Structures are given as C-alpha cells and as structure tokens.
Image (tube, rainbow, N blue to C red):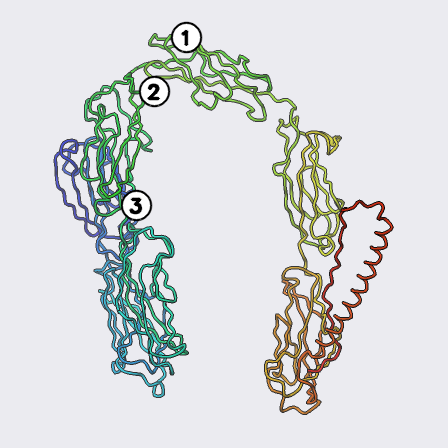
Amino acid sequence: MKSIFLFFFPFLPFSLAGPIQLLFSIKEELPRNSVVGNILKNSTRNFALRIIPKPKSNAGLLFRIHENGDLRTRSRIDRDEICPRQEKCDIEMDIFDRTVFYKVIVEIKDKNDNKPKFTENSTTFFVSEATGPGFSISLPAAQDNDSPKYGIKKYEIPDLRKKYFEFTWRRLEDGTDDLKLLLKRKLDRERKEKYNMVLKAIDGSGKSDSLKILIIVTDANDNIAVFEDQHYEGEVLENSPKGTSVLQVIARDEDLGPNAEIDYFIVSSDYLPFEIDESGVIKVKGSIDYEENHSYEFSVRARDRGPDPLSSIASVKIKVLDENDCTPKIHVKTLQVDNSFATMEENRPEKNFIAFVTVEDPDSGKGGEVECDLKDNKSHFLLKKIIPKEYKLVNKSPLNREDPRFDDKGEIGIVILCKDLGKNPNIGSSFVLLKVLDQNESPPVFKDSEVFKAIQENQGKGKLLVEIEANDPDGNDRNLSFRFKNKRFEKYLELKEDGNRAKIYTKVSLDHEETPELHVKVEACDQGGKCDVCTIHIQIQDLNDNYPEFRENFYNFSVLENQKSSLFVGKVNAFDRDSKSLNEFCLKLKGEKDYHFKIDKNGTIRTARKLDREKISVYHLSVYALPDTCNFLPTAPGVRKAIVEIWILDENDHSPEFKWPASSSYTISVNPDSRVNKVVASLVASDKDTGLNSKIQYELLSDKPAGFFQLNPFTGVVKLAKSLETFENGAVIKFIVKASDMGEKSLSSEERTLNFMVNRTSSGEFFGEIWNTYVLWVIIGLGILGAILLVACFALIRRGRKRSDEVDEGSPVKERMLAVKDVHYVPKDVSI
C-alpha cells in the first residue's frame, strides 16, 4: 500500500443529527487484509459496527470491519475488474450500530497495469478503384480496461500513405473510439493492388498494441451508397414490444441493377436490442430498459449488391424514454444476522432503534423520488427520515408485551409503504416482524425432558399415547400452556391441556410406511413467553399391509444388436413399503418374445441371446412385482406392473448394395455434342441398416481419361464435366465407382464400372429410351392391374347375387382398394 488518504468530517451523534461522513482513498492491487482506514479514529467509544452495502454495491465482498475499528480489504482490490474504464471508482457503504451511523466512501485510484489491446491481429478492407475522395473506412478500436487517465491516449499509423489516405480518430460521448481512414484521392488498381499499413494504439505511458491493415483495391462498381443524412436521431419508449419501428435510414446509389440495390447493417461491437430490415427501418428486437441504458449510439452501414460492393456509414443515436415502470424496492436491515426479524425489550424508552430502511428506485425524475411512511401502528412506531431514500424505524413510546396489539408471542408486524412521485405512481411495501422480549425470569420445567412410546400402525384415532407434566418455578402452574413446537405434528396428534398436564392422543390412524417414527417436541410456556421443551419419541411398529410396487410405470431402455447374451439392458426399481423383514418380493418378465431377455431379483434386465435389429427393432414387455415367493398370479388383485420398452440399436452390419447398375460393368453411349453439366447417369444404392449406417455416399475410384465426368457423392448423379468433341467415335471412358455407408466403421459395396462410349449417332436425349421403356412397363402394369380388378368385380357381383336374400336392403358394403406401387425399370444399356 503506497498511500492511504483519510478525510474525516465530524458531526453530531447519529441519533441526534445524522450520519458521520468518511472518505478513504486507496490504490488498486492492495492485498487481502490491508488496512483502508480506521472508523473509530479520534473516538473513545467502543462500537459494534456493521457494514450495510448500498443497493447493487459489492462493498460487503470487498471490505470488512476489524474488531479494533479498522476497515480492511477482504481480497485483492482490482479496480479494472470493479470499475472497468471508468473515470471514478467510489465504493459507497453505510456502517452503523444502535446509536452511531457512518456514511463511508472508499475511492480506488487506478494505476497503469493494462495495455491497449485489439481484438484481432489483422483486418482486410476492399476498396473499389472507382471510390472517390472522402470515402471513409471504419477501423476497429482497441480496448484498455484502465481508467481514462491511463487509457488510450492516441492512435497513429506510422507508415500511412498520406498521398492517398488520411487517418482521423475521435472519442465519442459513451467513451468508445471512432477511427476513420479517409480516402484523399481515387486509387488505381492497375498501378497498385494492395496497401499494407499498421495501426498503433498507445496509452499514456507508451504501452501499445498494433493491428495490421490490408487494403485491397478492387475494380468495377464505381458508386457508393450514400445516406441522405450522416447522423440520425430517434426516440423509443422503454419496454416497447419486439418489432416496434424506431426510425428509418435511407441511402441511395446512382448505379443501376444490383450495384444500386442496398443492404443495411448495424455496426457495433456490443450487443444492441435493435435490428435493421432491408428497407432501412430500425426496429426493436430485444428488451429496452431505461434504467440500464438512457440512449444508444451506433453506426449503420449501407452496402450495394454489386460484384465489388461499396458501403458508407452513418451514425445513429436513439434516446430511450423513461416509463416510470419501476416499483420502489425497500431494503430493511435489523441487528439480526439474517434480517428476518427485529427485537426490542419491553419498556424501552422512546426513539429506540428497531431497523434501518433504504429505498431503491432507478426511474428518472419524479419517478425516482420516493416518500415512505408506515401503513399502520403509527401510535407506537415512527419512520424517521435521515436523508432522501434512507430512514430509521424507532418506537414512539415504551412497549408493553401484554398489549392487545401484540399476539400471544409478543410479536407485531410493521408494514412500510414507499410511493414514487412520478405519473401513475408505483407503491412498494416491506414487512418488519418485531419481537418484544418479556422480562419474565424463570421458564417452566418438564418433569421428564424425554419420553419414549411404541404403538402398532393402523390403531385408529383417539388412542392415548402419553401424558406429560410441567411446573413453573415462578408458581404459575395453572397458567401454563402446551403446544407442539412444530405445527406439522397437528396432522397426526391431538394435545389436550389439563392445568400443568397435557395428554397426547392419535388424531389419525398412524401408518408405519408414511411415518415410521415421530419425534415430537412439546413446549410448556408461561404467560411471559418463557418455555421448556419435552421430546416425545414415538415408534410406529410395522404390519405386513403393502404390496410391492414400482417407482416408475414406464421404462425405456436400449441395447446394441449382435452382442453376446447376458448383456446389461437396464434396471427397473421396485420396492415394498413394509419394513425389511416384511418386504420380500420377486419380479417376473412377460410379453411377446420375452425369452429374449431375463430379469433377476434386483430388477436388472439382461439379454438371453443375440438380438437382430433388422428382425425386431423394439420389444414391448411387462414386469410384474409379486409378493413373497412368486406364488401370486400376475392378474391377482393388488399386483403392480411396469411397462418396459427396449429399443435395439443398430450396428453397421450390412454393406450397401447397388440397385443400379445391377451388373459390375455397364455401358452408356454419350453423344460428343452433349452440353456440359448434362446428367448422363444416376447411381442408386441402398443399405438395410438405419441412421448414418444407412446413409449412402458415392465415391469415384478412377476415371480414365480423368476429368470429363463429375460424380455428386450424395445423390449419385453423374454429369458431363467437359466437352467430348475431341474424342473419336467409339472411344470409351472408364468410370469406376463404389458406394459406402456413413457409419463409424464404414462398409462399402462392390465396385461398378460405367463405360461411357462416345457415339456420334446417339440421339443426345438422356433417358429417352429409359422413359419410353418406363412408360411401356407402367402401361403393361396398369393393364394387368385393371384385368385383376375386373375379374375381382365379377366375382364379387356373382357372390353378392347368391347372398342377396341374406343381405338387408341398405346394409353396408366393405370396399377394398388395391394400391399400385411405382414400377421402376432400368434397361441394361442406354444411349444418351
């Protein structure tokens, strides 16, 4: 720690005039447990101090109070993590006890421990030679997490070609840097195609980082899209729904066709809740919250669709309008560790501290100003304002625990209401539970602090379990009251008072499986609220009154095919609610093909033989949980079952098979005048497996001469890649292919050879013969099908006449439809 500065402003005591303000100043990188300053300096009083962080402050994680009054660091202080790139870094907190209140500000001073950093090492820009002077290129800015004092001070391009370029930069209102590379004159691609330069970012101490810039000069499109305005401003109401239009930017390009068609883009390194459509309309796409951002500033780029697209940039500022949508949030701090309640002894004098209240409302203007008061109980309590948004809760007069306003525990709820002053004001509320402590000295005492009792389950309600007795040393035995310390036991038991005695009865029939034992705490309390506790241990003895059951009604397992028997498939969970000596049961597996699996007494299912997915892909079985030694029938009343579904996973155990060509060698005639990219063949293969194991990929093994035909590996389509005009008639190009599946261990088909023969007499119409033959076979198939249908109709009519006497008029006639599947035929040799 190099330096610590303390500014001390003494004021009157907290209870009389308000807080004492302290300002400490430290440098970042202080180690853990460093002393920031002493809160009790120049004070002879010994305070029990607590830190209360401001809302959204992390002071409690950064600092702590030592018993000698030192404010110390909890961990190493890293300003660049706490307040990145901020001018000031002040941590505010409140420190107080019952009578003294300090407002403390710790200023963390920065040191230059970061250097500028670009997000990438190099960047490339394309500039058309038709681009005129004044064209600007937006360069990426560097980041430095230090404060502005030690942040980036300048950018420079030492090797700038000043004849053609001018470099400018400025710092925007939001603290980001806007870097431009301006074109001073047109570039000539024929003289120089590339410009290399280095952009350097330098902070105040000379630390720097570099970005390599490559500018490539392109040809053609010579007009850029130009915005009608260089700066656009708009407004949007916070919480606007998605799709709300904010403003429209318009750019125009004097070129024609695609060179004049414009696309718009939002340019920003940060996330923005806006998007821009093809017409330049900026719309809401995310959540907009005034409390997070009052405004957004960014750039939009207009770029034409020419082969060498040009672009320009305009700046946009969108102001977010506040909607007064935040409800005041009330924070209550008491002297209890968890702040769940406050305490005060009865008969304490007026204006005694109860709780510290702070209010948070991030809205702006009147919507962020609040006024607080108590909802009721104003005759007993006062909410005293310290400064705006900070109050303390005190009593107006001494409190009497026996006052009817308090419940029998001496507790009272105090409701605090805070309302903002904006239009359509929001009201926040908070609840403080105050426990008034009795001054009664002696608590009651039970005759027995523990009692043990056993009872069989299913005994019914109204059975006496135990009788307990307590005495009050203060002599008020008749005024004792008994109650269960935990009210959940009122579901099972009933307590009846008789002076200083209490009898406990069963309220319901007790079930060992639901509650095997109860450990009940009964309180005996005097009128002053002092109590003693007796613990009653009740053991509920079990009877064999439950059937075994499953934890789930449906189980879904999977197992790989072709594995040896006894392979683990899955486990079903069954149980009997009775105790261990009464919960024996067994499991039985039933269903179609159930002999393919076996199950043990623990519910583990294993294979009984090898499985073949291509024969059966899924098994639907039932598992029965049977009592004792499995002598029960599965259909007996009370027997439970679970459904088991076992899916057989595919193993890549089938190779692809060619459907076409079916033979190992196939000849196709190709006219040398055929156009390039014409389809000359289509391979067809299939695989009996499933998933990726059945996905086919076609591979060209060799083609001689090479390069004249092109194979699509996914569709199997073969196209003409080069003209065959140079080949002589009858020349043959061998095209050897195979089909492979896409399994992890891929399998392949047998090879197929396509012999493409150059034939100048070929018609040149691909699949002409295939199509004619296909149509012929379809016609033949339809004719045969028609004949079958005709014969079937005659048979049905004849049968109907024989049974006409037996059929009532209007009786339904079942119609049967025959489905005709597609007939595929490929001739052995085809000319194209």
Query: Disc 2 marks which amino acid?
Result: Lys
Q: Is residue 303 left or right of residue 716?
A: left
Residue under pointer 1: 499
Residue under pointer 2: 409
Q: Is residue 665 left or right of residue 501?
A: right
Residue closer to the observer: 812 or 428: 812
Label 2 sits on a secondary structure element that is loop
Q: CA distance from mark 3 to mark 2?
A: 39 Å
Residue closer to the observer: 168 or 33: 168
Local crowd at mark 3 within 10 Å, few (<14), some, or many (≥20)? some
Number of labelled discs?
3
The quarter in which the C terminus is drawn is: bottom right
From the top left corner, tell me how far across and down residue 489 is, in percent: 48, 22
From the top left corner, tell me how far across and down residue 231 is, in percent: 26, 66
As drawn, the label of residue 325 is 3
Label located before the other in sequence (2 or 1): 2
From the top left corner, tell me how far across and down residue 400 is, in percent: 25, 18
Label 1 sits on a secondary structure element that is loop
Local crowd at mark 1 within 10 Å, few (<14), some, or many (≥20)? some
In the displayed structure, 459 sits above or below 775; it is above
Query: Disc 1 marks which amino acid?
Result: Gly
In the displayed structure, 727 sits above or below 213; it is below
Query: Disc 3 marks which amino acid?
Result: Asp
Q: Which is closer to the viewer, label 3 or label 2?
A: 3
From the top left corner, tell me how far across and down residue 580 is, in percent: 63, 28
Figure quadrant of residue 725:
bottom right
Figure quadrant of residue 201:
bottom left
